[in-house]
Image (cartoon, rainbow, N blue to C red):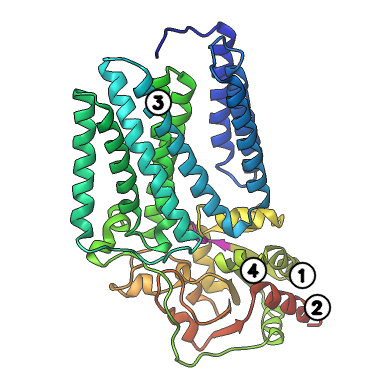
Amino acid sequence: MSETHVDPMWVQVSYLVAAVLFILALKSMSSPRTARTGVLIGAIGAALATGVLFFSGIKLANLALIVGFLVVGSVLGLVAARRVKMTAMPQLVALFNGVGGGAAALIAVVEYLVVDSDDLLFLIFTVATVIVGSIAFSGSIVTYLKLQELMTTRPVVIPLGKWITILVAVATVVGGVWLIVQPQEWLLWALLGLSLVFGVLFVLPVGGADVPIVISLLNAMTGLAVAASGYVLGNVLLLIAGTLVGASGTLLTNLMAKAMGRPLTSTLFGAFSGTTAGGAGSGSDRPVRSGSANDVAIMLGFAGKVILVPGYGLAVAQAQSTLRELADLLSEKGIEVDYAIHPVAGRMPGHMNVLLAEANVPYEQLKEMDEINPEFSATDVVLVVGANDVVNPAARTDQTAPIYGMPILDVDAAQQIVFLKRSMRPGFAGIENEILFDPKTTLLFGDAKDSLTKVVAALKNV
């Protein structure tokens, strides 16, 4: 906004095409069948928007530096995306989201320092971008550290944390208003620092099981920061793209909170009242019934209907292809097979869908929670692979449990239950699962991929 610039008609049309591509990408990513196509459409839209900028007539200073960093960033992004494991995908999403928020904040800082403007809307949007972008950046870094287990996954509540967080939030808002009314450079840097600190304090009290919801919320905040920076830079495409991300992220956050069965405020601030999900604890010494791969193969081989319940443990073991092999073998024997997908299984929305799509599991076999729950009572065997909290009956019965009220998969209604687990260690919520001690439950201990491979081998002889 430092100088008036009117884009040529072909540039405006190109931006419109890119915006349409972004909308089509979001629509396509709403289904596992078309998600891959949606990602490609979105990438084409981003490439178009970036490429057009260089030929739009805008005078770009330090062009060589811009192109250099563009190449470096593209290479780093490509390498990171290709090498990342499925188990680390949420961490990558958190980092990419943080980079987006941080970039928007830095752009706003530069514009504030370079552009001498007393336009009220310009100042409001610039300050809003600095605040929201900085919170998204530092908050995303903390979510990355939690997911990567570089810090505890349990809620972190510092002494007087509630009041310190409120104080920092109030100071950030006051500082923002002050900066709009009386622009001063030192106040800009103070506001940037306060926003970064608030982002950390905002995420620290969130337990590991709830981090995916916070990632979605921070993603929405990044979208809003980008949209605000679109006004600051006078770029309509940034306004559209940022608004799309902000709206979709907000919707996803609400849907995930609903899937967890408690309000978003409980997820974000429950640690201050001791009601949020924590990290993993230690298992119980109570006796359980364990079996061998041969025992499980016999149970599955003589079943009429089997439901497979994938969880984060499946992703850790990279056993999705082996699970698909088991399902195919059961189908060849005339056994009905379905996959039960809980909306928050894994570490990010759609984690299980993406994982199973990677193994080319037929989409028709993937059934969401509401669809599959009525079928458990008519199921002979349920095979749970690495899931815990999403099948834990404590969500229905124990009002003191951090997952109380969360809708779960009704695996306890099946005739027989098989759990594949490494150990008796609980899930992220840190509570025991009573199904493990049920007389109709058989536990098969070990790495999920190794256990499934042995079951497949044994099933071929049944």
Q: Nearer the viewer, residue 449 or 150?
A: 150
**What numbered label is drawn on residue 329?**
1
Look at 28% across and 58% down and name the residue there: 266
Q: Earlier in the sequence, mark 4 or mark 1?
A: 4
Position of residue 76 measured from the top left corner of the image (x, y, whole percent):
63, 42
Please report whichever mark, 4 or 2, sits nearer to the chain's N-terminal start. 4
Question: Magenta stretch containing residue 343, yes or no?
Answer: yes
Q: Of label 3 and label 4, which has the lower sequence position? A: 3
* Crowding near the residue tagged with mark 1, few <14, some 14–19, many ≥20 C-alpha atoms within 10 Å: some
Between disc 3 and disc 2, whose residue precedes? 3
What whole-number distance in Å separates the C-alpha atoms at marks 4 and 1? Answer: 20 Å
Q: Which residues are magenta?
A: 340-346
Q: Position of residue 461 (x, y in %)?
A: 81, 82
Q: CA distance from mark 3 to mark 2?
A: 65 Å
In the rendered image, residue 104, in percent from the top left (x then y), is placed at 43, 32
Q: Are marks 2 and 1 in contact (CB under 8 Å)?
A: yes
Q: Secondary structure at mark 2?
A: loop
Q: Which corner quadrant of the image does residue 136 belong to?
A: top left
Q: Is 70 inside the magenta-drawn segment? A: no
Quick one: 63 or 411, which is closer to the camera? 63
Circle 4: is it few (<14), some (14-19), or many (20+) Cα within 10 Å?
some
Mark 3 vs mark 4, CA separation in Å: 45 Å
Circle 3 residues within 10 Å: few <14, some 14–19, many ≥20: few
Q: Give me the C-alpha separation between circle 1 and circle 3.
A: 60 Å
**Mark 4 highlights which residue?**
317
